[in-house]
Amino acid sequence: MSETRYFGIRHHGPGCARSLRAAFDAWAPRIVLVEGPPEADALLPHLPALVPPVAILSHVVDAPQRAVYHPFARFSPEWQALAWTAEHGVPARFIDLPQAHALALGPEDAADDTPRDDPLGALAEAAGFEDGEAWWNQQVEERSDAAWLFDAIGEAMAALRSGETPPRDARREAHMRQCLRAARREGFERIAVVCGAWHVPALRDDGITAKADAALLKGLPKAKVAATWVPWTYRHLTRASGYGAGVRSPGWYDHLWATHERPRAAGWLARVATLMRERDLDCSSGHLIEATRLAEGLSALRGRPSPGLDELTEATRAVLTMGDDTVLAFVRDALVVGDRLGEVPPDVPTVPLQRDLESQQKSLRLKPESLQKTLDLDLRQPNDLARSQLLHRLALLGIPWGTLAKLGKSARGSFHEVWQLQWQPEFALKLIEASRWGQTVEQAATAAVLERCPTLGSLADLSRCVDDALLAALPLAVQAATQALQDRAATSGDVPQLLAALPALANVFRYGNVRQTDAALVAQVMDGLVLRASLGLVLAVQQLDDDAAGALREHLLAAHAALRLRDAPEPLAAWRQALQLLADSASAHPLLKGLVLRLLLDDGERSADDAATAVSLHLSTGSEPAAAAAWLEGFLNGNAVVLLHDTTVWRLLDDWLAALSEEHFVRVLPLVRRSFSAFGPGERRDLATRARQGASAAPAAAAPVDWPADKAALPLPWLRRWLGVPA
């Protein structure tokens, strides 16, 4: 007759895992039944090649977003049970409710085994602990003498479990009992059942018949489900990550597993010291000795056999970090939680899209890592350019492996890109979801853009889509997005939308030869947008309120900068003509009139005398003070150069302010202060110096410099190479 033993465990606990291995070595089961998705039985032969933490990813084939993960760390009891079977040639099976039913029923049934209430809370409270996890850690996970463990767990769960079983648990336990009966019918003599401790009383209940379980499972909905192994991280094993069966300190649990027969406290504090020294923080051997003594003293006072994480954290705070919680924060991230990322061998079945990505990661030497990593790319180098294109393509697929860092105003548009890389386990599911678009990253990203274009609601969104497709080197996607942008622009008279579309397109013309992008693909559509915006600009700025004028101001500035990058004669001439008309318009908002005059002045399209005349007109005593202040804000445009170097403008502004009545001065003061607050500290300091010199003081003229032409030409080859500009 077969003998069955039940091993109730916590899903991620080194004490349970160690005791389970010892129990298996002593008893030698002939088959091991493990709580987990039966669809993953076919994945068990890959177990010896896996490097935990890993997870079983189960998903509905026709709806990949309906998925569930079952994670394992090396200190997980289920993992050690499965590893023991692989080492001893013993069959293993998963016995939980199939995900074909669980995912068809809904997310609650697909989730991991996590009772809503803490079943250990009553025991913890009776023992004087804050919660069930703290009690369980001390009694189970941090002990090494737990031969009694599983019988005690079974008795505790039998005492705690009462009342009606929720339908979800009832279905799962019914299927587990059915699997146990099947193993008995096959004649296995010693059957080990490894499951969440909460389920042990229900699986031991011989009063529940096979007929009753079959009736409970009859008629359940079913979906087609696929399963695979995916890498996982310790950070995603924490409860804070949203994982229902998560633990607080997977890095600490890993340390407990690894230091079973070594000094636990000294080893942990040595790791803390190493971490601090890597950051150039003082931590001597004397500090370590004192911290170890303090941790051991605290554990003795509290009646604990050895220091736990609480005692070690308090000792670290008191001795090593001197009370600095900032240091404790990175100790927690790096050690208490941990940054380990698992590995899955290439022969594990998965979708072709993931295989293509793995192949590119290998050829481009881009290893996925759970730690955040900075990647500095020089786009003039073929390998770096290919890396950039891959990261941009993944972003189009909704897989933000890399985030483009800012360099000055923008990291785009030059030969230099800086990325922040960090691989997340959930990207494996996103790759499965993206497989509907294609079997390679290039195919999938192209199809994703083609599908997205008709849904984009604004010209700016379409323009950014063109830019993204160009950066990702997707010619078909560029053509489709460009055509969609051109079609939408042809029927749009919305000038702000036309202007908002220009900056993204202009990125193509900034060192486009370095990125190897074809600027001709978007030149025609950009020029068309400029001409349409120029024709409608003067009408669009009539009778605007302050908020609308402020919003349009940002569009004008961005569009003007974009036109400088394009530097095409015909659209630039049309744009400047529109600005000339706007500057002289009688009904345009004064903020915009002042702004465009300043832009024309900076471009040499208006003279300093023209600017002085305009300042005199708009800041005359007859001007309405609020309108004058708005014009001044636009004209200054956050740049004090014109005030510092043009005595006429300085004097006119000074005269205008001096002539204001007290009432008008109070009204315009906030507006003028807002204009001057946009200046940098150095500019404000220079303005104060000039104010002390008096309004008539002229700025000192710079001494002329006679540069020899031959010497001036020497740095040009280096500058061309540095800027990526061809000779």
Image: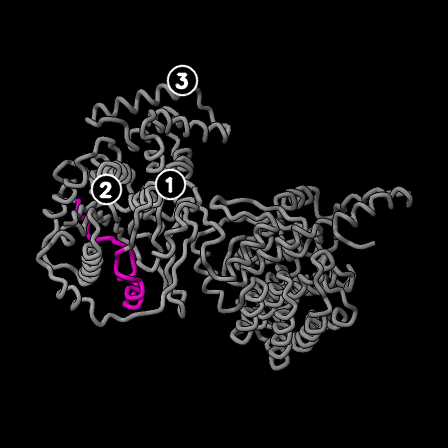
The residue under the point 23% across, 38% down is 23
Amino acid type at circle 3 is Gly
Determine whether label 3 and label 2 are within 8 Å by CB: no
Q: Which residues are magenta?
A: 95-120
Tell whether position 503 is magenta. Answer: no
Determine whether label 1 and label 3 are within 8 Å by CB: no
User: Outermost residue toward the left?
Assistant: 207
Label 2, residues with CA under 10 Å away: few <14, some 14-19, many ≥20: some
Mark 3 lies on residue: 286
Label 1, residues with CA under 10 Å away: few <14, some 14-19, many ≥20: many
The residue under the point 28% across, 37% down is 18
Tell which of 669 and 132 is nearer to you. Answer: 132
Tell which of 130 and 309 is nearer to you. Answer: 309
- SS of the residue at dot 3? helix
Foreground mark, 1 or 3, reads: 1
Distance, label 1 to label 2, CA atoms, is 16 Å
Q: In the image, residue 515 lies at what x, y percent?
A: 69, 57
Q: In the image, residue 43 lies at what x, y percent?
A: 38, 54
The residue under the point 57% across, 52% down is 361
- SS of the residue at dot 2? helix
Distance, label 3 to label 2, CA atoms, is 33 Å
Amino acid type at circle 2 is Glu
Determine whether label 1 and label 2 are within 8 Å by CB: no
Horizontal side of 459 relative to 149 (left or right) equals right
* Residue 337 image label: 1
Label 3, residues with CA under 10 Å away: few <14, some 14-19, many ≥20: few
Q: Which label's residue is closer to the chain start, 3 or 2?
A: 2
